[in-house]
Image: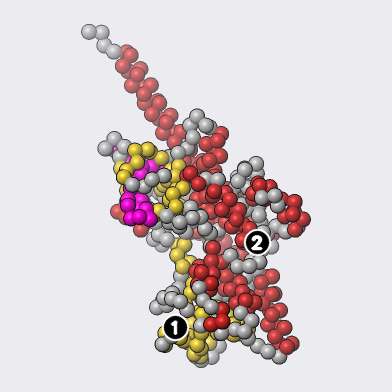
Amino acid sequence: MGITGSSAEIYDVVGIGFGPSNLSLAIALEEHGASTPQNPVKSHFFERQPRFGWHRNMLLPSTTMQISFLKDLATYRDPMSRFSFISYLHASNRLVQFVNNQDFFPTRQEFHQYLEWAAAGLSDRVSYGTEVTSIRPVAENGSGAPELLEIEVRGSDGATSVVTTRNVVISTGLVARLPEGVTSDERVWHSSEFLAKFNARDPQDLKNVMVVGAGQSAAEITRFFYDTLPNAQVSAVIPSYGYSVADDTPFANQVFDPDSVDDYYFGTDRARDAFWRYHRNTNYGVVDSDVIRALHQRSYDEQVRGVQRLHFRNLSRVDEVKQEGSGTQVVLRSLLDDRTEELAVDALVFATGYDGVDPARLLGDFDQLFQRDAAGKHRVERDYRLISEAELNCGVYLQGGTEHSHGLTSALLSNIAIRGGEIADSIVLRRTERELGRASSVRSVGSVGSVGVTP
């Protein structure tokens, strides 16, 4: 799809971002279109990256997914989907071998290949290397409640275009979070850029490396450093007293079931608080037990050998990062006795998580039409559509940024197949209602005209 000039076509939906969430939506829309070829849903997606990619910089060797392969892009919504992980394995001639592995958790590398395979099957629906810069409402006939949205798009060459749609689904992902005053450079990295930054350095120059954080990414990077740099000193700076294990037991995992979204959305404030209080340890600031055990085993082996290059600095935090000449100095503060320690590092990795992107950045003045709650968060319908203050016949949907309204699964892979299907159903239903309303209006006008008045 070209992006110069202005498109006369009106889409049913435009997606902003083409990560797993909007990819799953595209599949749901495609499969709905396949069932009604006479009236397919017209959609298109815009993605800033030059090609499909999902956390590429954390595709570390042998790291595995934290969810079952059945929680793929489509299976929970439609087990017969041609876009399932099973279909991918069959197409790759690896289904038998995968079954022989007797493992529900594929490697992250293989799951990424699956996502690329699925995205390639919908390549005509997405424009890569493009960035949506604004969204504005317009009335279809120049008056009345806005029925259309104009999406301004900038291509990699800087040229802009405007596409028109009845609905938009915003799925712009997350933004890397660094401590205040810390900026990324050749020696200070965020986990989201890890492999790119690591591969740009000569491993021989990495004698002292440090990882900050207590979650899965921090532990995986620490293990990777230790295994890949056999002569380096590796420090793990952990704000807690060691890593905490992720609760992936069956009852706890029910918090990610599709039905839990209704329980959270329609629950009381006390019920929602209980979700977070009792179940944060399923995903946030926790580490899979196999990774914890692997790191502890490495530490214990060092004790047996009488050597140490793996250092766990528990109950500690980074107070300051200083650039001195060609080196980087890190000031650590112990939460035990408030003492500080200054260390020179060749690489400092912050695995400190992400922040959501407020859709107001794209919506601009249009955002004033949408309701917010007492905490300043957007109010969202059960179908993930923003609730407007005034009459609005076009829809703005969110994929991500709805943890406050829809619960823990909102930013995770666990429920994307169902969520994509629900958004697709909402778009199709509202289109049908609009078409029926217009047909009814035409019949009404026709019947009035047929009565007439005898001159």
Q: Which residues are magenta?
A: 143-167
Is residue 63 at least partly visible in the picture?
yes
- Comparing 71 with 95, the one in front is 95
**Measuring 60% from the left and 55% from the top, which residue is drawn there?**
113
Q: What secondary structure do most residues of the magenta stretch adopt?
A: strand
The residue under label 2 is which amino acid type?
Answer: Thr
Classify the position of the N terminus by image quarter: top left
**Measuring 77% from the left and 55% from the top, which residue is drawn there?**
100
Q: Which residue is mark 1?
A: 321
Number of other residues with Cα within 10 Å of mark 1, as a class: few under 14, some 14 to 19, many 20 or more: many
Q: Mark 1 or 2 closer to N-term?
A: 2
Instruction: Based on the picture, tell me whether residue 159 belongs to the magenta stretch.
Output: yes
- Residue 92 coordinates in the image, percent (x, y): 66, 50
Q: Quadrant of residue 43?
A: top left
- Comparing 316 with 192, the one in front is 192
Q: Is residue 410 above or below residue 448?
A: below
**Measuring 47% from the left and 44% from the top, which residue is drawn there?**
125
Q: Secondary structure at mark 1?
A: strand
In the displayed structure, does residue 300 sit left or right of residue 349? right
In the displayed structure, does residue 227 sit left or right of residue 276? right
Q: Residue furthest right?
A: 100
The residue under label 1 is which amino acid type?
Answer: Val
User: What's the mark number on residue 107?
Assistant: 2
Alpha carbon of mark 1 to alpha carbon of mark 2: how far? Answer: 34 Å
- Residue 367 coordinates in the image, percent (x, y): 34, 53
Instruction: Based on the picture, tell me whether residue 150 belongs to the magenta stretch.
Output: yes
**Measuring 48% from the left and 44% from the top, which residue is drawn there?**
124
